[in-house]
Amino acid sequence: MNKVRFFHEFIKKKVAIYDTWLIAAGFVLFVLLVAASYYYLYINHELVKQTSSSLSLSQQLAKTRKDYEDLKNQDQYKINQSQKTEIENINKTFKKAESEYQDIVDLDTQKGKTDPFKKSFAKILDYLSDRNYSSASADLTTLAGDIQKEKDRLAALLQNSSGGDVSVASLAQNNTPPGAGFSRQAVSANGETFAVDIIAADMGSTRIVVDTASDSDCHDNCPVLSLGDYVARSGAFAGVNGSYFCPADYPSCAGKSNSFDTLAMNKNKHYINSDNNVYSTVPAVIFLSGSMRFVGQSLEWGRDTGVDGVLANQPLLVSGGNVAFGGGSDPKQGSKGSRSFVANKGNTAYIGVAHNVTVAEMALVLKAMGMDNALNLDSGGSTALWSGGYKDGPGRNIPNAILFIRK
């Protein structure tokens, strides 16, 4: 009996020892698994970063956009209202990142010095991928200031016909627009002096048309041409870039690249974007034989094909000799840059580019020049003006342009 009891006690001790070793081994295995998992996640994160660094900034931004959209659509973010403010801050940071990237693309098109900006933006993308929104936001503010300084530098220098730089300060001040042909002049408005490149044409001897790369509605991967190509194929003597559009080099334009959504009637009498502009409040200019008509809203215009051309864009700058735009909520319209316009004074038509202006300042400049009516056109990297060669630009390829053709 004592032997049996001894045997039982011996087995109990052995089992206890075995259990202790088993628990210890299990704990060690658990620690090793956790360490391996963290190591895998770290390596994977580093690989993602290395892969991102080999991508273009555009591709990285597109990936960040997808991550951001996935984050917004997670159930816990939809349900948890306490995180609403955080999501709004994330939204603002991401939109600002897209805006600054577009500015970098535009500066690239205008031959600006962008290498330092690209390095800064790559760092910002790393912050965004790590969801470090506060650091991304702080760096974006600094980047925006640096980009604006480069914009100001470019705006203060104009190119001459030989490709050399011309200082705005060297231009003769003259608020009177030319009666015909091209002029580069300094215009005084609102206590400041602005450089203006402007082309004048008598509407009695000039046909003004809108040329488009597509003859019908286009919503994605739309055809585009350079302003010079539009001028050449229409036999025009002058031209300017047209309406706002969604450039293919903007990641935010994926799925609608090179498309524009405002009303246009091209030289072939084809109306474009007619269906979605039946009730449009976007202003438009109508080119008739020997005159121009400006309307405050596209919905005021029918679909008359007896005119030479129609193009809608915004905002209307001058109407009836008075400033029609004093500023708005769009930060891009409130930043300085080179901006294109179409205008008239009596029976003289004008196209041109005002430099280093906000949209509201351009309205003041054109009023100071005595324009009866004026409409804002696209700007930034799309800015282009032609008169016997590029006076500004060439900028990126564009989906439409306004052309002066001799009758």
Image: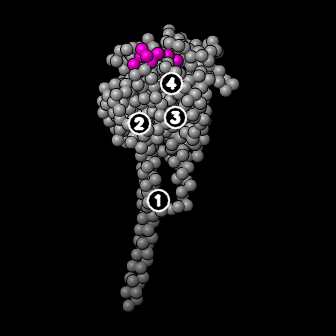
Numbered tag placed on residue 315 in the rendering: 3
Task: Give me the C-alpha separation between circle 3 and circle 4.
Answer: 13 Å
Q: Residue at x 58, y 28 (%)?
A: 321
Q: Residue at x 50, y 24 (%)?
A: 343
Q: Secondary structure at mark 1?
A: helix
Q: Position of residue 337 (x, y in %)?
A: 56, 27
Q: Which residue is mark 4?
A: 343
Q: Secondary structure at mark 3?
A: loop
Q: Position of residue 366 (x, y in %)?
A: 58, 24
Q: For the N terminus, give its image quadrant.
A: bottom left
Q: Secondary structure at mark 4?
A: strand
Magenta region, residue range: 198-208
**The disc labelled 3 sits on which kind of residue?**
Pro
Query: Mostly what secondary structure, the magenta segment?
Result: strand
Q: Which residue is mark 1?
A: 78
Q: Nearer the viewer, mark 2 or mark 1?
A: 2
Q: Is residue 139 visible?
A: no
In the image shown, does 59 or 401 lie closer to the viewer? 401
Task: Give me the C-alpha separation between circle 2 and circle 1.
Answer: 43 Å
Q: Nearer the viewer, mark 3 or mark 1?
A: 3
**The disc labelled 4 sits on which kind of residue?**
Ala
In the image shown, does 314 or 283 lie closer to the viewer? 283
**The disc labelled 1 sits on which kind of residue?**
Lys
Numbered tag placed on residue 279 in the rendering: none
Who comes first in sequence, dot 4 or dot 2? Answer: 2
In the image shown, does 332 or 250 lie closer to the viewer? 332
**The disc labelled 2 sits on which kind of residue?**
Trp
Q: Which residue is mark 2?
A: 301
Who comes first in sequence, dot 4 or dot 1? Answer: 1
Q: Nearer the viewer, mark 3 or mark 4?
A: 4
Q: For label 3, count other residues whose C-alpha is less than 10 Å away and answer few (under 14), some (14-19) or many (20+).
A: many
Q: Nearer the viewer, mark 4 or mark 1?
A: 4
